[in-house]
Amino acid sequence: MDEAPFRITPHADFFFEGADRGATLEALLYAILHDEGIVKVSGEVGSGKTMLCRVLMERLPEHVEIVYLANPSLAKEEILRAVADDLHVQLSEDRPTIALRELEDRLIESFAEGGRVVVLIDEAHAMPEETLEQVRLLSNIESSRHKLLQIVLFGQPELDEVLAKSSMRQLKDRITHSFKMRPLSEAEVGKYLSFRIRAAGYRGPDLFSASAVTMIAKAASGLTRRVNILADKSLLAAFTDNKYLVTKREARTAIRDSDFGRLLAEKRRNPSVYAAWALVAGLAIGFGVPRMLPPDDKQAMSQSLPPPKPISGEPLAQSKISGATGPDVKLKQIVDAPEAGQKQSVTNPAVQEGKGTISRLGVEASSRISAYQTGPNRLLKARIEATKERLAREPDESYSIELFATDNSDPGRVERFLLRAKELVAVDELLVLPQGTDGRYRIRVTFGGYPDRTAAAKAADALPQKYKQAFRTELRSFAELRDSL
């Protein structure tokens, strides 16, 4: 190896794009370059926020001026001066109104020359509320059509608690994108370890056994900083024992030598934890697990179960679409009535009998899409209706090109994207899928419908260069899109 693979100091060469990190980076680049207002990135301690921020700073084009604020204890008046200092603006007075005006003049000058300015605020959760309010005032600096200053807030989950206060509602309403740095899964930890040692120059077989990866992933709770610490300690233990491969033994040694490893061991020694989970499991079995799950989990569970056996001994009809039985295919199941002894015909309501049309979009999924409130945004409303029609008729094996997916479901923001898109692509080919329930949605935007993956890949290569730079496109089958609802 050329250098230490698991140092905890952020280094852009060791940026892992898995676990949605790469997609979040691309979305941040797009938001900063396309006037998308304030952006928020939250995550637990050690989840990789600072690394993401460093890589973002390196990936931004040269015409973007960067102001990086790492001191969360800045006072209300100090933040204006900190931004001005980084932009080489000499403020003539300390009064906030005068300072804002002078700063605005500098931003207008930069914008006129084709430049942009972005303020990256680290540890935003620790900022005083007065300082965060000053951030909101900074975000108001704009021309008649464009934001002159883009702001990205990086913080721990406590930032969400601060923004949830009624006193912070004006700032919260200006946040157009919210991203969360989720922990790595066990499989992603394995890929992460392999990536890091190869980024350090290693070219041999993997150094971590599957059992070691499992132990490290669980002990670290999927947090990259903890993974780095445990991986480094494990390699040291293997080196001390003159071993090439890191096994459970070395991983266990590393975990015992760490504070969070001891916390994990205490959980294992606490029998009340097992008793509590046994009680929960018993209640779930007694009352029926499906009733305790949210709608999406119920659907996933029903799809994982084997197809039901016919009560009357007659075979169930098979779907002409996927060749399997299930709730979203044309089925007629003959069952014995409990008392009258008569047979009843149960037909899937998603099927329009007598018209020769089979809708591939289930009634429940269609209702969830319709529940998304588009407000006065006519183009968005039209595209969602067109998307439902497309999802209902496209075969499972057809493909679409995913442009992006975001947790920011603000209909006004999606409408603005569609209006800009009209200048670059055929807007009739843009599909907008609101995914979620109970008013909480994730927006997925895809382009077109193609008979197979090969055709979709060719179409993706033909997308406008601006889209190929801004989006990390993915090919999604219509079966996958429907399942995601």
Image (cartoon, rainbow, N blue to C red):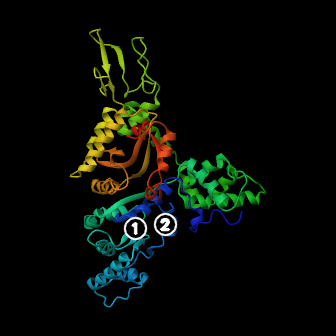
Residue 370 horizontal/vertical position (percent): 27, 41
Q: What residue type is labelled 2?
A: Leu
Q: Residue at x 40, y 72 (%)?
A: 118
Please give the residue where the numbered disc 2 appears in the rendered image. Answer: 56
Q: Which residue is drawn at 28% across and 49% down?
A: 380
Please give the residue where the numbered disc 1 appears in the rendered image. Answer: 152
Residue 290 lies, with reference to residue 272, above or below; the image says above
Residue at mark 2 to residue at mark 1: CA–CA distance? 11 Å
Residue 223 horizontal/vertical position (percent): 53, 57
Residue 405 horizontal/vertical position (percent): 40, 51
Q: How crowded is mark 1: few (under 14 residues within 10 Å), some or many (20 or more)?
A: many
Q: Are marks 2 and 1 in contact (CB under 8 Å)?
A: yes
> Is residue 366 something that shows in the picture?
yes
Q: What residue type is labelled 1?
A: Val
**Mark 2 or mark 1: whose residue is earlier in sequence:** 2
Q: Residue furthest bottom?
A: 92
Q: Residue at x 40, y 73 (%)?
A: 116
Locate the C terminus and report the quarter of the image it occupies. top left
Badge nearest the viewer, 2 or 1: 2
